C-alpha cells in the first residue's frame, strides 16, 4: 500500500517517489517496466543480511533472471576504484542494455549503483529502493549519481534519473543513530531553505520525535521530497537554482574527503557545514543573529553536531578541490533569511578560514 507519493518531473523525465510500509508491492512496480532482460541488484551485506529475503521474494515471482552484486558499505567505498569489479561481474552475467539495476541500500549504494547504471553500455535503466532516511529524503531523488576520488567527493558523476523510487519504511527501524543523523541533517537543510510551516514544524521537534513509526517522520520525508522535487523539476542539471541544495555541503564534503570518508557520516559532515554556512550568512548577507541562534537551537535539539575538530587550513585545502569552486574565491550557498537564499556567493578564502577557526571545537553560540 502506498503511504505517500510525489512526482518528480522535468524536461524528458517523470517518475514517482513512493513511501511504503514494506517491500510489498515492489513486484507490481517492476512488472510494469517494459522489456527487461534481467535485474542487477547492487546492495551491501549489512542491508542484505536483514532485508534481502523480502526483496528476493518480490523479484522471484516475476520470473526474470536476477543477480546480486555486493559492495562494501561506507562512503570510502563509493570510490571509482570499486567500479571495475562491478562492471566485470555484470559482463560475466551477460548484462545487456535491457537490464535494470536495482539500488537497494542507503545513499552510498544509491549513488554508486546509479553511476554504474549511467555508464554501463552508455546507460541502462535503474530503480532506487532506499533503505535509510538520508536516501529517502535526499539522495534517491533527483538523478545525481556519482563516485568519489581521493581528493574530492562526487567528482566523477552523471545525471541519470531512476525509473521510480520505492522507499520501504520498515528498513528505517533498524537504523543506527548516526544514520538517523544523516537523514535529519538533510531534513533540516531543506527546512532552512524552505522556511514557513516546514521550518516551524521542525523547530518544535526533538531528536526522540523521529522514529520509524512517527507521523513526524512521514511528514518530514514528504516535505523534503516535495521541496527537492520542485527544485529538480526546474533545474535538473544544476545550472541554476538546484545549487541551493548544496547548502552546508561545501564544508561538509571537504571534511569528508579530508578524513578519508571514515570519521564522520555524511549527515554529520553536512551538519557542521550548515553551521559554517549560517555563520557566513550572518557575515556576508546579513542573516540576523536572532535567526542564527534559532537555527543553531534547532540543530542542538535534533542532536546534530555543530563544532568542527579538523584543522581549518586543511579543510580549506579540500574545499579548493571542490567542483563548485571558481577562481580564488570559494562559492557557497548562503541564507539572507529562512526561505530566502543565494547560491554561488563568492567568499574570500581568509573569511572562510576565520569562520572555520571560530567554529573549531565550538558547540554553542557565543
Image: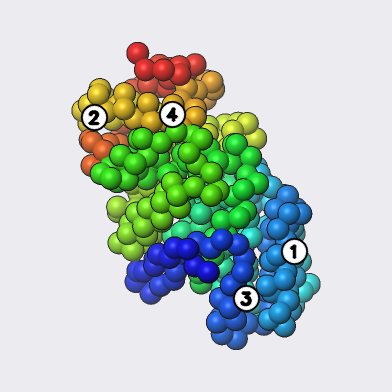
Between 355 and 3, the residue placed more toward the observer is 3
SS type, badge 1: helix
- Which one is in front in this view, the residue at disc 2 or the one at disc 3? 3
Decide which of tag 3 and tag 1 comes sooner along the chain. Answer: 3
Q: Residues within 10 Å of mark 4 (few under 14, many from 20)?
A: some
Gap between marks 2 and 4 measured at Cα: 21 Å
Decide which of tag 3 and tag 4 comes sooner along the chain. Answer: 3
On the image, numbered disc 1 is attached to which residue?
A: 53
Say which residue appears at 44% left-offset and 69% top-offset: 16
Gap between marks 4 and 1 measured at Cα: 37 Å
Decide which of tag 2 and tag 3 comes sooner along the chain. Answer: 3
Say which residue appears at 58% left-offset and 41% top-offset: 179
315 sits to left or right of 66 = left
| Percent coordinates x, y for residue 246 in the rendering | 40, 44
In the depicted structure, whether residue 311 falls above or below residue 330 = above
**Outermost residue toward the bottom?**
35
| Percent coordinates x, y for residue 244 in the rendering | 33, 46
Q: Name the colouring of the figure.
A: rainbow
Gap between marks 3 and 4 measured at Cα: 40 Å
Say which residue appears at 49% left-offset and 67% top-offset: 2
On the image, numbered disc 3 is attached to which residue?
A: 27
On the image, numbered disc 2 is attached to which residue?
A: 287
On the image, numbered disc 4 is attached to which residue?
A: 301
In the depicted structure, whether residue 150 falls above or below residue 228 = above
The C terminus is located in which quarter?
top left
SS type, badge 3: helix
| Percent coordinates x, y for residue 355 in the rendering | 37, 21
Say which residue appears at 45% left-offset and 17% top-offset: 362
User: How many marks overall?
Assistant: 4
Decide which of tag 1 and tag 2 comes sooner along the chain. Answer: 1
Tell me the number on the disc at residue 249: none
SS type, badge 2: loop
Amino acid at each position: 500500500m502506498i503511504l505517500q507519493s510525489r512526482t518528480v518531473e522535468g524536461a524528458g523525465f517523470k517518475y514517482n517517489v513512493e513511501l511504503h510500509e514494506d517491500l510489498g508491492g515492489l513486484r507490481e512496480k517492476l512488472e510494469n517496466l517494459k522489456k527487461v532482460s534481467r535485474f542487477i541488484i547492487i546492495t551491501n551485506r549489512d542491508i542484505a543480511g536483514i532485508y534481502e529475503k523480502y526483496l528476493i521474494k518480490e523479484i522471484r515471482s516475476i520470473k526474470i533472471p536476477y543477480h546480486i552484486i555486493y559492495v562494501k558499505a561506507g562512503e570510502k567505498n563509493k570510490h571509482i576504484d570499486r567500479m571495475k569489479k562491478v562492471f566485470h561481474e555484470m559482463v560475466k552475467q551477460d548484462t545487456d542494455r535491457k537490464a535494470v539495476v536495482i539500488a537497494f541500500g542507503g545513499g552510498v549504494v544509491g549513488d554508486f549503483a546509479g553511476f554504474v547504471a549511467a555508464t554501463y553500455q552508455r546507460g541502462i535503466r535503474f530503480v532506487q529502493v532506499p533503505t535509510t532516511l538520508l536516501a529517502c529524503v535526499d539522495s534517491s531523488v533527483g538523478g545525481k549519481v556519482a563516485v568519489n576520488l581521493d581528493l574530492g567527493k562526487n567528482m566523477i558523476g552523471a545525471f541519470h534519473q531512476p525509473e521510480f523510487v520505492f522507499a520501504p519504511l520498515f528498513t528505517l527501524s533498524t537504523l543506527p543513530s548516526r544514520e538517523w543523523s544523516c537523514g535529519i541533517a538533510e531534513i533540516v537543510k531543506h527546512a532552512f531553505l524552505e522556511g514557513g510551516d516546514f521550518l516551524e514544524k521542525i523547530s518544535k521537534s526533538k531528536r526522540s520525535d523521529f522514529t520509524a513509526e512517527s507521523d513526524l517522520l512521514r511528514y518530514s520525508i514528504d516535505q523534503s521530497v516535495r521541496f527537492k522535487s520542485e527544485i529538480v523539476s526546474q533545474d535538473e542539471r544544476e545550472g541554476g537554482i538546484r545549487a541551493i541544495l548544496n547548502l552546508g555541503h561545501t564544508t561538509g564534503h571537504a571534511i569528508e574527503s579530508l578524513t578519508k570518508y571514515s570519521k564522520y557520516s555524511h549527515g554529520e559532515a553536512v551538519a557542521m557545514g550548515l553551521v559554517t554556512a549560517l555563520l557566513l550568512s550572518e557575515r556576508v548577507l546579513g542573516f540576523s543573529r536572532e535567526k542564527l541562534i534559532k537555527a543553531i537551537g534547532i540543530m542542538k535539539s535534533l542532536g546534530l553536531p555543530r563544532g568542527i575538530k579538523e584543522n581549518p587550513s586543511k579543510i580549506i585545502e579540500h574545499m579548493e578541490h571542490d567542483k563548485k569552486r571558481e577562481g580564488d574565491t570559494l562559492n557557497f550557498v548562503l541564507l539572507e533569511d529562512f526561505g530566502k537564499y543565494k547560491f554561488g556567493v563568492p567568499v574570500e578564502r581568509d573569511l572562510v578560514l576565520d569562520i572555520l577557526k571560530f567554529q573549531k571545537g565550538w558547540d554553542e553560540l557565543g
